[in-house]
Image (tube, rainbow, N blue to C red):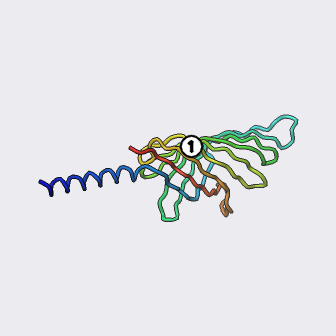
Amino acid sequence: MRKSLAVFLSGAALVIAASTALAGEQVLEFKLVTKPIDVKVIEAANVEGQTVMAGKFFGVAVFKDGRIGVKEFVNSADLLKGSGPFYGYSTYTFEDGSITARYTGLAKDGRSKGEYTILSGTGAYANATGTGSIESVPNPFKGVTLLGIKLVVKTPGT
């Protein structure tokens, strides 16, 4: 009986440890290649170089260890000669779940930099919150954007 209780309690401790291991903070860092899917750019009347842009985009996230994910997002920007604020909403889908976030940033001199606020998640990222960063990186490819992404994902305990 005593041995059975010890085995049960150690099993219960293992289950508790496993469930709390799912809670906490996780940092996801990867490169993101994005491509416009359906974008509308409108030039402002009587303001040389002023455009307002909105559209749908798609991206592929690539981790250093070879894992991949996909991103679908909408983006809006208010640019004067290519520089100005932008914002949007992203959903990243990974093998173990998804993360939806809002981002804001600034494009200037051909570079972009911004911040994420994580709104929700599914699967391993259920009820996620957190923050993150976006920064353009040198891009040898035409017709796509290459970004460095860091997401600090906080998931609640069970």
Please state the horizontal and vertical placement of residue 13, each as a whole percent of the image. 29, 53
Please state the horizontal and vertical placement of residue 103, each as a whole percent of the image. 63, 44
Q: Secondary structure at mark 1?
A: strand
Q: Where on the picture, by quarter, is residue 119?
A: top right
Q: Which quarter of the rendered picture does the C terminus lie within? A: top left
Q: Residue at x 64, y 48 (%)?
A: 115
Type of residue at label 1? Ala
Mark 1 packing: few (<14 Cα in 10 Å), some, or many (20+)? many
Q: Residue at x 60, y 55 (%)?
A: 149
Please state the horizontal and vertical placement of residue 5, each as a whole percent of the image. 17, 53
Residue sitting at the far front: 2
Q: Which residue is mark 1?
A: 101
- How many labels, in total? 1
Please state the horizontal and vertical placement of residue 46, each as a whole percent of the image. 88, 35
> 36 or 19, which lies in front?
19
Q: Residue at x 79, y 55 (%)?
A: 109
Q: Where on the picture, by quarter, is residue 104?
A: top right
Q: Is residue 68 left or right of residue 134?
A: left
Is 22 placed above or below 38 here? Answer: below
Q: Residue at x 64, y 57 (%)?
A: 146
Q: Is residue 148 left or right of residue 3?
A: right
> 2 or 47, which lies in front?
2
Residue sitting at the far top: 45
Is 3 placed above or below 77 here? Answer: below
Q: Is residue 76 left or right of residue 79?
A: left
